[in-house]
């Protein structure tokens, strides 16, 4: 990674004790059940589906870079911590169910190709199918979707094609090889923990041995992939998290992603389904048994994990995604993250509960949200010729700029002053509230100026608390700032 981007080489730039770091920044101490840090904004003018679709059709997205996302909601087991849109797959009518869902996802994107012509002319530079557990789909079903994508959209020759799954989806080499053969060139596997007691309590459906085999298979096909790991779960300790990350580092996993447990109720926010642990009776029982780690212990887990990553030469880009040097070009960041976060390119999102955004026009952004009713979505797609949009959010002024800044911060690539002048009409180095907030973050050692003051980049301390900083400083303080944005362009 460019030295202007990453300060890993300077160990003094990283706080050895995250508990002490949090102690110095009490405004960033967010409890487990309030911790729903989400780079997507929860503000802006709410639009009903009909108006949203009209604005969607008018968006000038032709010829511009875009990311394509499909949400497949079925899982072979439901993790107790999961608050995303998901549903247990049928054990008896699997083939029919997979056919119906493949048809539904293809139909939805076909409706956009028919009614919103610019979507077929946007330059698709990255594609991701997640969920749920997208790799439940067979290579044949996934090939149908990829063929449809190539036939319908303007997919660039070097498009990054991602598929997400669990170790039990990738533990057979033949399936991994088949997915590579049909075109997938990047994988994401959710291991979360190698500790059997943790996996049993969270209702994960795989063993440590299965996880290791899946990783070996992914390494064998030679494509980049990330392994997702969580911290802050019941029955985890700093020692077990440390051992988990050491295992991955020793296997030279290309990208290791580390996530803190989010136990907020996303369903009440309209962006997910309720997790088992969101149910008060269940959550309170876990609390009474003192199974949730404390905030201090949770951050000690991250601290221990990052110690292994730094020692092994991994670099965080985007925040929370630690990659070996040279894994990806252009800042050592996956293309999906560069499109979604670094550049905040338009994201076309299909499937139940999927949310995306249309960006790059009129210093604004348009957030799109599909219905999160899984059965209702499937019925709608089998009986209607209209997109399953639920609502949207129109972000303008400081709200649009705050959202783009949140994504840019998450990417841990340089946040360029000139870009925000051109795209959002603000000078983040001079205009308020941007100037004061960036000066405060610099004084606290959470970001630093780079490129001769023409850009900012999170420090390693700022990376450690990136989600909290995005929520508190960028979304809350900038997004709620009421003074009109000056239209300074150029």
Image: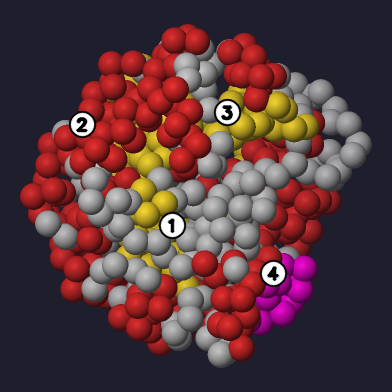
Determine contact: label 3, label 4, CB under 8 Å: no
Residue at numbered disc 2: 143
* Front one among 50 and 463: 50
Residue at numbered disc 4: 30
Which label lies toward us, 3 or 4? 3
Which label lies toward us, 2 or 1? 2
Picture coordinates of residue 429 (x, y %)?
76, 42
* Front one among 210 and 461: 210
Which label lies toward us, 2 or 4? 2
Instruction: Indicate which disc, 1 or 3, sits on the residue closer to the N terminus.
Output: 1
Left or right, residue 389 beside residue 301: right
**Element type at mark 4:** loop
Residue at numbered disc 3: 389
Instruction: Indicate which disc, 3 or 2, sits on the residue closer to the N terminus.
Output: 2
Cα distance in 3D space between marks 3 and 4: 32 Å
**Residue numbers of the magenta segment:** 17-31
Who's the residue at 24% across and 38% down the image? 96
Cα distance in 3D space between marks 2 and 4: 42 Å
Picture coordinates of residue 152 (x, y %)?
34, 16
- In the rendered image, residue 277 lying in the magenta stretch gets the answer no
């Amino acid at each position: 990674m460019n030295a202007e981007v990453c300060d890993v080489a300077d160990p003094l730039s990283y706080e050895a004790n995250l508990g002490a770091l949090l102690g110095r920044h009490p405004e960033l101490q967010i409890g487990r059940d309030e911790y729903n840090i989400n780079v997507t904004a929860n503000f802006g003018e709410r639009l009903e589906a009909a108006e949203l679709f009209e604005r969607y059709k008018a968006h000038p997205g032709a010829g511009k870079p875009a990311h394509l996302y499909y949400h497949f909601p079925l899982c072979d087991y439901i993790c107790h911590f999961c608050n995303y849109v998901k549903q247990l797959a049928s054990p008896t009518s699997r083939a029919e169910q997979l056919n119906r869902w493949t048809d539904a996802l293809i139909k939805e994107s076909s409706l956009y190709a028919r009614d919103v012509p610019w979507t077929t002319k946007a330059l698709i530079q990255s594609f991701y199918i997640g969920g749920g557990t997208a790799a439940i789909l067979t290579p044949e079903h996934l090939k149908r979707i990829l063929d449809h994508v190539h036939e319908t959209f303007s997919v660039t020759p070097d498009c990054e094609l991602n598929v997400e799954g669990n170790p039990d989806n990738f533990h057979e080499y033949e399936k991994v090889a088949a997915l590579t053969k049909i075109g997938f060139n990047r994988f994401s596997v959710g291991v979360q923990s190698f500790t059997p007691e943790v996996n049993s309590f969270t209702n994960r459906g795989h063993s440590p041995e299965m996880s290791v085999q899946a990783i070996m298979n992914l390494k064998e096909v030679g494509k980049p992939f990330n392994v997702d790991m969580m911290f802050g779960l019941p029955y985890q300790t700093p020692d077990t998290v440390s051992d988990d990350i050491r295992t991955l580092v020793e296997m030279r996993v290309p990208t290791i992603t580390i996530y803190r447990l989010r136990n907020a109720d996303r369903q009440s926010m309209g962006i997910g389904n309720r997790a088992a642990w969101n149910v008060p009776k269940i959550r309170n029982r876990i609390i009474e048994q003192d199974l949730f780690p404390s905030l201090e212990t949770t951050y000690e887990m991250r601290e221990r994990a990052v110690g292994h990553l730094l020692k092994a030469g991994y670099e965080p880009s985007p925040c929370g995604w630690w990659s070996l040097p040279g894994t990806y070009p252009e800042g050592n960041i996956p293309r999906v993250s560069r499109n979604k976060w670094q550049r905040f390119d338009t994201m076309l999102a299909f499937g139940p509960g999927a949310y995306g955004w249309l960006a790059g026009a009129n210093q604004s952004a348009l957030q799109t949200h599909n219905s999160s009713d899984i059965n209702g979505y499937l019925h709608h797609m089998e009986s209607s010729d209209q997109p399953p949009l639920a609502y949207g959010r129109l972000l303008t002024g400081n709200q649009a700029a705050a959202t783009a800044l949140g994504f840019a911060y998450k990417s841990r690539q340089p946040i360029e002053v000139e870009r925000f002048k051109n795209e959002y009409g603000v000078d983040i180095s001079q205009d308020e509230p941007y100037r004061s907030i960036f000066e405060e973050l610099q004084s606290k050692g959470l970001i630093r100026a780079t490129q001769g003051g023409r850009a900012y980049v999170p420090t390693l301390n700022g990376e450690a608390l990136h989600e909290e900083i995005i929520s508190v400083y960028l979304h809350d303080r900038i997004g709620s700032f009421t003074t009109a944005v000056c239209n300074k362009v150029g």
